[in-house]
Amino acid sequence: MSDPRLAEAAQLRLANDFNGARARCEAVLADRPDDAEAMSLLGVCAIETGDMAGGGVWLDRAEAANPRQGLVHLYRSMLHEARGDLDAALASARRASELAPERFDVWGRYGDLAGRAGDFQACADALDAALKADMSHPARPHVALRLAGARVELMDLKGASAALDIAEAGGLAGTLDVLRLRAELARHAGDWAALTRAAQAWLDLAPQDNEAKGALALAWGRQGYYRKAVRLFRPVVDAEPGVPENWAALGRLLLGARDLEGGQAAFDRALELDPNCAEATFGLSRIHTFHGDSEAAIAMSRRTLEIDPGNFEAYGQLSEVSGGHLTDAELERLTLEAAKPGMPADRLSIGLFALGDAHHRRKQRAEAFAAWSRANDTKKLQHNGAIVSAYDRAAQARQTDWQTRVFAGPAGKPAMPLEQQPVFIVGMPRSGTTLIEAAISAHEEAVAGGELGVMPSLFEKFLAWAGETGWPGGEIPESVLVPWREQYLAQYRDYGLTGARWVTDKQPANVLAVGLIRQLFPDAPVIHIRRKPVEVAFSIYRRNFSRMWPFAHDLEDIAHYYAMQARLGAHWARVFPERVMPLQYETLVGDFEPQLRAVLDHCGMGWSPRCLEYYNVDRAVMTFSATQVRKPPSREHLDSTSPYARWLAPFDAALKHLPVDPQTGLWTGPDGARFAS
């Protein structure tokens, strides 16, 4: 049993009372000259007061007295570290952990040294052992914080979060180091709301911290608040103009804000500073894609992969632009990268979708669908922390029922002449919205807005307002509508969509908001485009959809959401027949000019031959369909699903239980079948 005087010596040493500690040790040695613990403590006191030679002598004597004394090796690791020999320090700490596995300080030191040496697995294992060795040690929260950092390095996000929970419970909640790691965890998980919270708290504590500003700007950008993010991040770039990564990050935000010219300038500046800035070459590949220059986009994607062979976004871009045409070497490398453990879920899913497309291109259908399925499981994991769907079928059905009740007929809003009239193109994603928008916006008096983000946000505000006020239906007060209307129209200025008489908005999710749209913009035409359900489902399942589309990662969920929007589409066509026009994609493609004339007539626009040759119009297209929309309408993709019938069977089975026509996507339930077009 250790002499109580040595426990006192250890406490005095920790309090920097080295003379008191030495006195206790010397008293013990007077009684027991071969006490290795006393000599070890004298050794560390010498080391910590700058007497390396004397410390070494005491440790040699202690080891000779008891070679299995763990403290000897613990303190010898400190001596090696003080002399600059990290390898020897780590070896001594490892030996100490073998001899004294019950000691918190032994494991803590071994973990810290392993982390400094870059061995994060050993670091994490040792720090975890420290936490288990002493549940009440005062340094436990700080060790847990360091463990969280090691877990992040290992991409063990769940383990890192658990370690941070311990650190926060121990009194470190809200500290800068904890907030930094919380932000890092959220970034890796793609949880942009959590990143916003952590980064904002971090910035509140350190208002001048550029790293915090960058994290918050990233969070805002990923949630669609690009202009807000640009305003926050531009001063960071100005403060450090020689950092290429900052210019590349700014370029990405500017692209999100639809400032292609500004984005290109930022990427070009990044490459001036560093010709091997992969984020900048990737950004340029996106710009070339938006402008329809496929060859340049492919070249820049491959340049990105030369710089960073594990860049999943570049694989995704290359696959999108080339139609999945990866070389054998690229496919092999992507397969290897996607198999590596610990990849961030948001990036891994991009690589897996690209991998599926590459196999699809080669008609390797089992491999293709396996990759897409793994990609969608990864998206579920990213959203929920488990491979379970985030789509709430019951909630979506309740909302659909409610909308058919509260929007039971025209609200009686008077005509509202506007300088610029919205044209809403709604339906399922991947149903042909980009095609019809491209044709309409080729008109001399129209401009393409693309998938504008304000209406879904307004719809969420509307749902909250209706819930808070108990709104029973009927007219929404103008006092409520006016600021929402102004917010919607303000995005025209933000995105440079001014000057045209008509502005298209092809946000598919707006099918949920048509009742609100009819009160905000009573004269606005709405086109509800339908496409054969299984074709839509297959196209969605192969794409990297964001959190906005929680149903997109499960075939049965896609079937359910398809039915809900089909029911709403039929309802809108019934109650707003003068403004809502159903349009069948297959009919549009097969009989393009007559269908397009009918659409333009519905919108109140005169005929323009330019609309027939929309694919020759020079404009940027910033959606999944950027490549396809630069080609004439074609029947080529009317049946892309037959080779995958066995894998798409869960969708077909789910749809059979829903009142939706499997060929047209038309709602066939109550109030639906009568309104076929």
Image: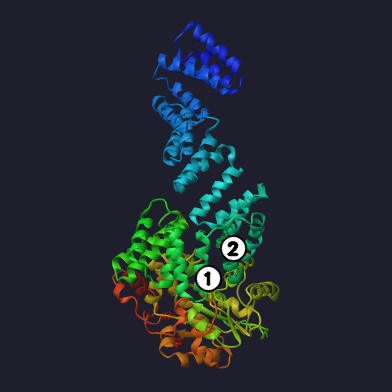
In the image as oriented, which residue stretches furthest toward the right? 479
Q: Is residue 258 visible?
A: no
Kind of residue indicated by mark 1:
Ile
Q: Which residue is mark 2?
A: 269
Residue 320 versus residue 165 in the image, above or below: below
Residue highlighted by disc 1: 287
Please tell me the numbered disc located at residue 540.
none
Question: Residue 244's quadrant in the figure?
Answer: bottom right
Label 1 crowd (10 A; few <14 / some 14-19 / many >=20): many
Q: Is disc 2 surrounded by few (<14), some (14 to 19) or many (20+) residues within 10 Å?
A: many
Label 1 element class: helix
Residue at coordinates 57% horizontally, 75% vertically from top-left? Answer: 406
Relative to residue 513, is residue 83 depicted above or below?
above
Spot occupied by residue 569 in the image (x, y as percentages of width and height)? 49, 79
255 or 237: nearer the viewer: 237
| Mark 1 vs 2: CB contact within 8 A | no
State the image coordinates of residue 332 (x, y, percent, origin top left): 33, 60
Q: Position of residue 55 (x, y in %)?
A: 51, 19
Q: Nearer the viewer, residue 359 or 517?
A: 359
Amino acid at the residue labelled 2: Arg
User: Which residue in the rendered view is the most extreme toward the top?
Assistant: 31
Q: Is residue 495 visible?
A: yes
Earlier sequence position, callout 1 versus callout 2: 2
Residue sitting at 63 percent across and 52 percent down? Answer: 210
Residue 630, image x, y percentages:
47, 81
Q: Nearer the viewer, mark 1 or mark 2?
A: 2
Q: Secondary structure at mark 2?
A: helix
What distance separates the C-alpha of mark 1 from that of mark 2? 15 Å
